[in-house]
Each structure stands twice: as structure tokens, then as C-alpha cells.
Amino acid sequence: MASTKNDLTKGLSGAVGKQLVFRIRNGKTFASKYPDMSNVKPTEKQLAEKDRFGNAVRFAQSIINDPVKKAAYKVEKGKSVYHTAIKDYLKEN
């Protein structure tokens, strides 16, 4: 990872396409190659959590796509129905 001292890149973070990544560590900006995750195999537990979260998203979408369910869903002030439904699903399952 290369530290950059260029004023144009100072404070940048995130990816540029899938070629370059800027990171900030201890106030310094670093540039590095985009990570190659093609050989990383997720564990059974990671796959199970991914599936569980997908089910939560489908549940939340079913709530927001039905106007009656959406209006009846209990939500704290300032929170969205979608995110509250995901949170509720993940707590129950």
C-alpha cells in the first residue's frame, strides 16, 4: 500500500472502478490495488447468514409493497418501515 502526499487524493476513501482503492489510516491516505476476492470461499455459516438476510429483505419488501401492511406496521419516529421490518425479522429468526 502506497502512502499518498498529493493534495488531490488527500482525504479520499473508496474505490475507483475496480482498479484502485483509497483508504485513510491514522490521518494518512493510502492507495492500493483493488482486492481480488475470486478465490475466497465463504463458510457454511456465512452462507446461512446471507440466506437469512435475503429472507429478511424479501419479508421487508412484502411489507412495503402492500399499502395496508405498510400503514399498519409499527415504526419508531424517524425510522423507515423497510429497515424496521428487516430488523424485526432478524430478531425473530
Image (cartoon, rainbow, N blue to C red):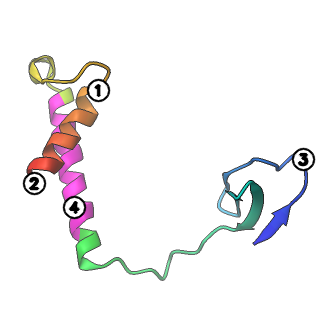
Residue placed most toward the observer, 19 or 87: 87
Q: Amino acid at mark 2?
A: Asn
Tell me the element at label 4: helix
Tell me the element at label 2: loop
Residue range of the region highlighted in magenta in the rendering: 48-63
Q: Quadrant of the C terminus?
A: bottom left
* Image location (x, y in percent) of residue 30: 76, 62
Q: Relative to 50, is 39 above or below?
A: below
Give the mark toward the camera: 4 or 3.
3
User: What main secondary structure does the magenta stretch of the protein show?
Assistant: helix
For disc 1, the neighbor class at 10 Å (few under 14, some 14 to 19, many from 20) is few
User: How far apart in space, not on screen, are marks 4 and 1 (Cα)?
Assistant: 22 Å
Task: Decide if residue 27 is on the left or right side of residue 8.
Answer: left
Task: Decide if residue 41 is on the left or right side of residue 68.
Answer: right
Q: Which residue is mark 2?
A: 93
* Image location (x, y in percent) of residue 71: 14, 16
Q: Quadrant of the N terminus?
A: bottom right
* Image location (x, y in percent) of residue 45: 23, 74
